[in-house]
């Protein structure tokens, strides 16, 4: 079953001589539980693609289906709720709430929708992420690698259809980068979690099941990773 379907996606900025095609007729699909990486240089269009697939920006043309839903056919308010409930985000900068502890940061997306957290699952997540003994720590009391693990837990808390990881190792050293990549692999396998990661690092992309290359707004499927 395909969790993500992208069809003929285009994004154009400017007009006339200043026109830039950030996305040029991009089409691809991702199956449930698949860990997919998109690799490309800065300015290649990969961040634009992630922002549009994650419903953070609108395309110039094309369609995106997540879990069978045509996301850009939704009214803005409905799309906002859909994004919060069905898409998890892991950003390079962690984006944790400094006043909340580890556990509170992880359950925060659920509380936004007035949902009671499943603490059996949250406790399991804390254990898998190696954060059980840090559950009451604030972000400022954690290392960069630990903060990114909290961000991964937060993305997983709602059991989303899709997790979008935007350069998730960009602020981490080599050791922590490898730990975060291993965690993403584990989450994909353990929870059948579908993950779309963008990165400029080809070695990190090899952690995924399948790799695409983005060049000048065009996407090429490089096939199964050689991990």
Image (cartoon, rainbow, N blue to C red):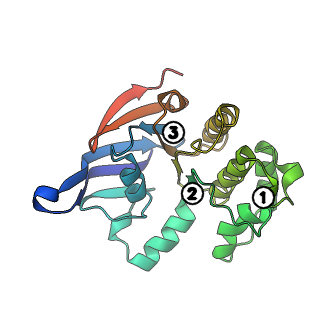
- Quadrant showing the C terminus: top right
Q: Nearer the viewer, residue 200 or 38?
A: 200
Q: Residues within 10 Å of mark 3 (few under 14, many from 20)?
A: many
Q: Residues within 10 Å of mark 2 (few under 14, many from 20)?
A: many
Q: Residues within 10 Å of mark 1 (few under 14, many from 20)?
A: few
Taking the image as shown, residue 224 lies to the left or right of residue 227, namely left
**Residue 87, x across and y down, in percent:** 53, 59
Q: Secondary structure at mark 1?
A: helix
Asked which quadrant contains residue 154, the reply is bottom right
Asked which quadrant contains residue 12, the reply is bottom left
**For residue 88, which numbered disc appears in the image?**
2
| Vertical comparison of 40 with 97: above or below | above
**Residue 93, x across and y down, in percent:** 60, 54
Q: Nearer the viewer, residue 172 or 84?
A: 172
Residue drawn at the location 35% of the way across and 57% of the way down? 64
Per the model, the C-alpha gap separating discs 1 and 3 is 33 Å
- Foreground label between 2 and 3: 2
Q: Is residue 68 visible?
A: no
Per the model, the C-alpha gap separating discs 2 and 3 is 15 Å
Q: How many marks?
A: 3
Residue indicated by mark 3: 34
Q: Nearer the viewer, residue 154 or 159?
A: 154
**Residue 115, x across and y down, in percent:** 69, 73
**Residue 70, x across and y down, in percent:** 36, 63
Asked which quadrant contains residue 145, the reply is top right
Q: Earlier in the sequence, mark 2 or mark 1?
A: 2
Residue indicated by mark 1: 140
Q: Earlier in the sequence, mark 1 or mark 3?
A: 3
Q: Nearer the viewer, residue 182 or 45?
A: 45
Residue drawn at the location 70% of the way across and 68% of the way down? 108
């Amino acid at each position: 079953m395909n969790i993500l379907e992208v069809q003929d996606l285009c994004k154009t900025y400017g007009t006339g001589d200043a026109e830039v095609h950030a996305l040029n007729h991009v089409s691809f699909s991702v199956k449930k539980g698949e860990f997919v990486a998109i690799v490309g240089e800065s300015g290649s269009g990969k961040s634009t693609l992630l922002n549009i697939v994650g419903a953070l920006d609108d395309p110039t043309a094309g369609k995106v289906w997540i879990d069978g839903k045509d996301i850009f056919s939704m009214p803005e308010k409905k799309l906002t709720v859909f994004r919060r409930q069905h898409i998890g985000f892991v950003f390079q900068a962690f984006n944790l709430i400094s006043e909340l502890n580890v556990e509170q940061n992880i359950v925060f997306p659920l509380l936004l929708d007035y949902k009671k957290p499943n603490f059996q699952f949250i406790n399991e997540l804390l254990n898998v992420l190696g954060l059980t003994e840090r559950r009451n720590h604030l972000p400022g009391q954690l290392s960069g690698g630990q903060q990114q693990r909290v961000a991964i837990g937060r993305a997983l808390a709602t059991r989303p259809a899709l997790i979008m990881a935007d350069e998730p190792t960009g602020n981490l050293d080599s050791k922590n980068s490898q730990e975060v990549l291993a965690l993403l692999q584990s989450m994909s396998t353990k929870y059948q979690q579908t993950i779309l990661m963008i990165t400029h690092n080809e070695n990190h992309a090899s952690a995924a099941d399948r790799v695409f290359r983005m060049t000048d707004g065009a996407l090429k499927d490089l096939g199964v990773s050689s991990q």
